[in-house]
Amino acid sequence: MESVERTNASAQEVMLSPVILVPAVLNGLMAGAVYALVALGLTLIYGVLHIINFAHGALLTAAMFAAFFAYTLLGLDPYLAALMIAPLFFLVGYGLQRFVIGPTAHGEDRNYLLVTLGLAVIIENLLLYVFRADTRTINLPYAFDVIEIGAAFLAVPRVIAFVTVMVVAFALWIFMQWTDTGKAIRAVAKEKLGAELSGIDVAHIHAVTFGLGTACVAIAACLLIPTYYVNPTAGDAFVLIAFTIVVLGGMGSILGALVGGLFVGVVESFSSMFLGQSLGQIGIFVMFIVILLVRPSGLFGQQA
Amino acid sequence: MFRQPLSVTRRKFMQTTALGATAAAGVLSAPAVLRAQGGGVKIGVLHPVSGALSYSGQQGRLGATMAIDEINGAGGIKALGGAKIDPMLGDAQSTPDGGNAEVEKMNEASVCAVVGGYASAICLSATQTAARYDLPYIVDVGVVDSIVTRGLKNTFRFGPGFGVIAKTALDNLVSINDQAGKPAKTVMIVHEDSAFGAGLAKLLNAQLPDRGFQVLETIPHPTPTREFENVVLKIKVQNPNLVIPANYYNEYVLLARTMQQQRVRPKGIYSVLGGAASSYKFVKEFPEAAQYIMDCNHWFDPKNPKALALKKKVEEKGQFYTYEVYMNYSCILLLADAIERAASTDRAKITAALASSTFSGHVMPYGPTKFVDGQNQGAAPVNTQVQGNDIQVILPTAFASAKPIFPMPPA
C-alpha cells in the first residue's frame, strides 16, 4: 500500500488553510450525526437494560436492506420510508427483547451477551443467505445536489441526515423527560426493584427501550442508504464506532452519545484527511484507547 | 471495516454446479468415465459475480457465455467430433480465497482449462492453485505483471499487463500534452489500495517525474469506499493540472461525481485503467460527470466487423459493451482454438497448444496471438475520451475516431 506522499512543503501549509479545514469539519459533523444516532440506540439500551447489545450492527444492516428494497421495489424515498421502517423496527426490537432475549437471558449479564451475539450471527447469516455478499447502492436523483455554506458545498443527503438526527435526539429527550413511559424508563434504569414495586411492568419497559433503540438504528439506516452501500456486514463498521462513542460520551448518556458522535465524526474526517482514506478510522480507535486510560467513565458518564 | 464472507454457501455451490449440465454429476462420480462417453468439453469460467466487483464479474461472465454459445451453435469443437463446450461457472466472490475455492472445485470436476479471474488479486492466487494441477489458465483481465512472471507454465494472459499499459499511457499523455502546448505540469493520483491500484500508482510515481510531471500527492483508498469528499477537498486545495484515478467501477463513478459536485475541474482527468472511464454504462448514466475524461484502457478493435457485430448483439440484450465482455469473449475463442488444435481435452496438450498459439480470430486490436512466458506479446491498450454521449478512440492514430479535447473546456 502506498503511503501518502507529499513532494512539496507548500502542500502541508495548504492543508491547514480554512478552505480545507471548514469543509472538513462540516463533513465530519454530518457523518458524526449518523454515528451519534446509532450510538444513541446503543446507549439507551445499555442505560436501561445494562446490557451491551451485540445485535445492534446486524439490526442496522437489516434496516439498511429494508430501506434499500423500499426504494428499489416500492419506489419509496428512503426519508419517507423511515416513517414506516422505524415503527416496524420498533416492533421487531420490542418482540426480540420480550420474547427472545428477556426469556433466554434469565437476567444474567453473561447470557445477554451470548444471546445478542447469537442473534447478530443469525441475522447476518440470514441476510447473507438471502441477499448474498453483493454490495448494493441506490442512486437518488438529488444525491449529488449541494447546499453552499461559504466555501463548502455540502451534499443534500448529509444535511438532511444531520437535521433529522438533531430532531430525533430532541424528540427522544422530550419523550424521556415528560411522558409517563419516559419516566418509567428512567425509573427502571435507576432502580429496577423500586420501579417494579411501584407497579411498573419492567419486562414491558425493557422491551419498549429495546424497541426505541432499534428504531434509532432503523432511522439511521434510512439516513445512510442514500450515500452509503449495503451488504450483509455493512452495519459492523458503524457499531464499532458507536461503541467508541458510547464509551466517550459515558455509558447510558443521551447527550454524551450526541456530542460524542459529532466529535468522533470530526476526528475521523481529519484523520482520513491527514493519514489517508485507508487509515481514516485509526484516529477513532486511538482516541478510544486514550479515553479508557484517562477517563473511563466518559465525558458525561457518572463516576463508577 | 469491510469484510467479505470467506465460505462458499451450500446453495451457491449447488447453483454453480447445477448450471453446468454434467458438472454436478462430475463431482460425484468418476469424471474420466463421463468423458469417455463423449460428454462435452468441460471448462471453468471464473468471475467475481458477487461482492464488491460483481458488476465487472457479471459482464465478464456474459462475454464468456456468449462466446461459448456461439461456438456450440456453430457445431462445437470439430476435432473432438463436434463436442460441445460445457462451462462450469464459478463465483470468486470478489476475494482471492473465493477464487481459489472455485478452482479447487473446477479441478475436482475435471475441467480441462479455466478462463477468467478479472481482478489481479484473484488471478494471482487462482492461477497458482490451477498450476498445482497443471490446469491451463487464461487470465482475462488481471493486469499485475507478476501474474505472468512467476514462471507458471499453465498461465497465459491474453491482455496487456501493467508494464505495457503504464508505458503506453505515459507516452500518450506526453504526446497529448505536447500537442496542446504543455498545459499540464502537476498531477495527483487517486488509487484503490489492493494489488491493482497500488501497483499502478507505484509505477506512475516512478515514471511521471522522468516525463516532466510533478506528482503533488498520491491518495490510496479501500474498495469499497462510499465517500470521496475529503479526497476531493485535497484535490481542490492543491489544484493539480491533472487527476489520475486508478480504481474499480463504483469508486471511479463516485470520485468523478464528487468532483463534479464540489466543482473541481482540473485541466484533465486522465485515467489509467479507470474502472469506469471508458464504460458505456458510466457515460449513459452520468454524462456530465464523464465528459472529456480520458482513459488508457482495454478496448476492442473498432475496425473489426466481428467486434462491432458483438457490440450490437450485447446491446440488443440490453447490456453495456464493456471491456470485460469483449476480453472474455476473445479468451474463450482463444481457448477453443487451442482445444481444436490439441484435438484433445488433455491438460498438457492444451497448454502446449496455447503456448504455440497464433490465434487471430479475436476482437481485440492485438494482431495474431504470440505468447512469450505466458504473456501475449501483441496485447496493448488504447486511449479513449468521452466526447458527447459516446466514447471515442483518440490514440493510437491507426484506430482513432476523434482528436483529443485537452485541456477540458471550462464548464
Image: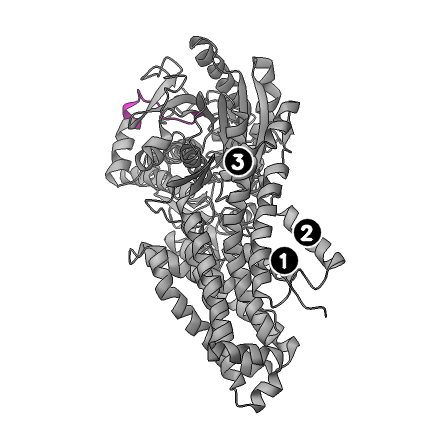
Quarter of the image holding residue A155? top left
Across and down, in percent, residue A200 comes to: 52, 87
Tell me if residue B297 comes above or below residue B66 in the rendering: above
At horizontal 66% and vertical 76% (from top left) the residue drawn is A110
Q: Which chain letter goes with mark 2? A: A
At horizontal 41% and vertical 36% (from top left) the residue drawn is B261
Spatial CA span between label 3 and label 2: 23 Å
Q: Please report the bounds of the magenta region as a residue range.
A: B295-307
Residue B104 visible? The answer is yes
| Residue position marked by numbered label 1 in the rendering | A244
In the picture, the quarter occupied by the C terminus of chain A is bottom right
In the picture, the quarter occupied by the N terminus of chain A is top right
Tell me if residue B406 comes above or below residue A192 in the rendering: above
Q: Earlier in the sequence, mark 2 or mark 1?
A: 1
| Residue position marked by numbered label 3 in the rendering | B231
Q: Amino acid at mark 3?
A: Val
Q: Amino acid at mark 1?
A: Thr
Query: Is circle 3 on the same chain as circle 1?
Result: no
At horizontal 66% and vertical 24% (from top left) the residue drawn is A9
Dots 2 and 1: beta carbons under 8 Å? yes
